[in-house]
Image: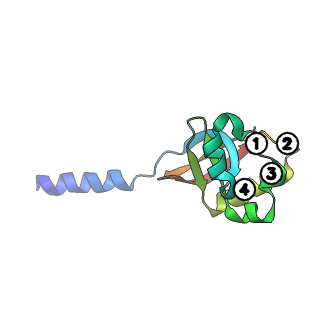
């Protein structure tokens, strides 16, 4: 009986929704992410809006490069939100963003995205 109670509690804890993570970093398309990671966070701000909106870059998807040089890939809806935010923004580079979403490994299910 005690095992069943422990198992039931464990299942409930696992099924609880995760709190949304809040992440800040530089918005980078997946096609350019390897270069951004190699060059480091400090230089990632040089990545331009024009590059990110090129067809091949846009189609690759988006993510955020964090200050500790980790690249977190957005889900498909997050990529759509990133593209819309880029198109609406007057910024040409230094594309810092604040993202909230649910983490799953190195991928984030984006709930909100704002260019800073």
Q: Which of the marked residues, 4 or 1, is nearer the chain's N terminus?
A: 4
Q: Position of residue 33 (x, y in %)?
A: 64, 51
Residue under circle 2?
91
C-alpha distance separating marks 1 and 3: 8 Å
Residue 3 lies left or right of residue 75; in this view the side is left
Q: Which mark is residue 86?
A: 3
Residue 102 lies left or right of residue 112; in this view the side is left
CB-based contact (under 8 Å), mark 1 and mark 2: yes
Residue under circle 1?
95
Q: Which of the marked residues, 1 or 3, is nearer the chain's N terminus?
A: 3
C-alpha distance separating marks 4 and 2: 16 Å
Residues packed near mark 2 inside 10 Å, few (<14), some (14 to 19) or many (20 plus): some
Quarter of the figure that contains the N terminus: bottom left
Q: Position of residue 83 (x, y in %)?
A: 76, 57
C-alpha distance separating marks 2 and 3: 8 Å
Q: Please give the name of the residue rendered at 68% of the width and 58% of the height, measured from the top-left corner.
A: 31
Residue under circle 4?
81
Q: Which of the marked residues, 3 or 4, is nearer the chain's N terminus?
A: 4
């Amino acid at each position: 009986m005690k095992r069943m109670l422990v198992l039931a509690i464990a299942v409930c804890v696992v099924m609880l929704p995760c709190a949304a993570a809040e992440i800040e970093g530089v918005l980078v398309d997946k096609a350019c992410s390897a270069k951004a990671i190699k060059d480091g966070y400090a230089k990632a701000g040089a990545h331009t809006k024009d590059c990110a909106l090129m067809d091949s870059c846009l189609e690759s998807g988006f993510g955020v490069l964090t200050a500790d040089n980790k690249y977190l890939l957005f889900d498909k809806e997050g990529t759509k939100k990133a593209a819309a935010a880029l198109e609406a923004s007057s910024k040409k580079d230094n594309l810092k963003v604040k993202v909230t979403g649910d983490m799953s490994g190195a991928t984030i299910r984006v709930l909100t995205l704002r260019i800073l």
